[in-house]
Image: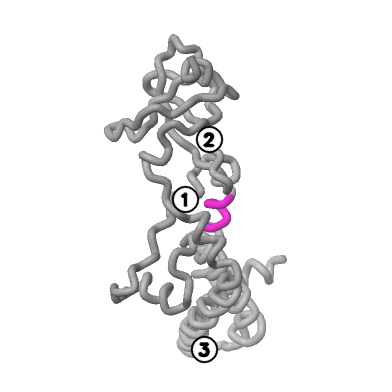
């Protein structure tokens, strides 16, 4: 076990070890509802007439435009960690000269990035269309009139949280309502408006909405 941790902290695997910790922390928080699963997702789709550059350009060239960045980063990190770990375990750790070890490690790091990106693309291309459909942004207008389930203990003018089932992992929303409404955890509410200042949604109970 000590050899495993020693290898995991060597260059270049230490970079992917750090990324892996961040990715695991993100998905753990998302699983418990502490973070929105779409928190770090960005729009990576472009019109056909636009010449994409940088990171988004790479995604487009790899055929991953529109795929959630969190999923791309997760697979990329996993592939990168595995490749660099076995590189360290197989030969890098046996190089005694520090300068040479870091030079070899840097070369392995660059090659690993290239391989990991293409392996990620290879794995995600078969399910790309499905992932893109799940990654379509929900506008404020689209959420008005939707039903959500309260997940916080109570809802008042300053605090409140609900989850809206969207066919995927669900959207966690900040909601507001008068405390006198007595809205509590498990209640079904309807979104009636959006407050841009507080980035929250005004809601009413399902019963009140139907009356």
- Separation of residues labelled 1 and 3 (CA atoms): 45 Å
Please report whichever mark, 3 or 2, sits nearer to the chain's N-terminal start: 3
Give the number of the disc on residue 97.
Answer: 3
Can residue 211 be seen here? The reply is yes
- Residue 53 screen position, x and y as percent: 31, 75
Q: Nearer the viewer, residue 129 or 29?
A: 129
Give the number of the disc on residue 163.
Answer: 2
Q: Is residue 25 magenta?
A: yes
Q: Residue at x 51, y 31 (%)?
A: 147
Residue matched to label 1: 38
Other residues around mark 1 within 10 Å, as few (<14) / some (14–19) / many (≥20): some
Q: Is residue 2 above or below residue 148?
A: below
Q: Is residue 126 above or below residue 89?
A: above
Extent of the magenta region: 22-27
Specify the farthest residue to the top: 180
- Residue 52 screen position, x and y as percent: 32, 74
Q: In the structure shown, which secondary structural element does the residue marked by tag 3 occupy?
A: loop
Other residues around mark 3 within 10 Å, as few (<14) / some (14–19) / many (≥20): few
């Amino acid at each position: 076990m000590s050899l495993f941790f020693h290898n995991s902290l060597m260059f270049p695997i230490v970079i992917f070890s750090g990324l892996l910790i961040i990715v695991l922390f993100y998905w753990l928080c998302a699983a418990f509802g502490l973070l929105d699963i779409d928190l770090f997702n960005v729009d990576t789709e472009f019109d056909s007439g636009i010449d994409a550059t940088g990171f988004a350009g790479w995604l487009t060239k790899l055929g991953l435009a529109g795929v959630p960045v969190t999923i791309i980063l997760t697979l990329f990190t996993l592939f990168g960690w595995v490749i660099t770990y076995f590189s360290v375990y197989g030969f890098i750790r046996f190089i005694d000269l520090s300068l040479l070890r870091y030079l070899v490690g840097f070369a392995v790091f660059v090659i690993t990035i290239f391989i990991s990106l293409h392996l990620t693309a290879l794995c995600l291309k078969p399910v790309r269309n499905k992932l893109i459909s799940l990654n379509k942004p929900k506008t404020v207008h689209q959420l008005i009139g939707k039903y959500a389930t309260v997940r916080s203990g109570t809802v008042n003018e300053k605090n409140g949280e609900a989850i809206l089932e969207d066919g995927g992992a669900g959207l966690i929303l900040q909601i507001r309502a008068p405390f006198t409404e007595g809205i509590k955890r498990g209640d079904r509410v309807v979104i009636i408006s959006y407050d841009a200042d507080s980035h929250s949604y005004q809601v009413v109970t399902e019963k009140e909405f139907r009356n």
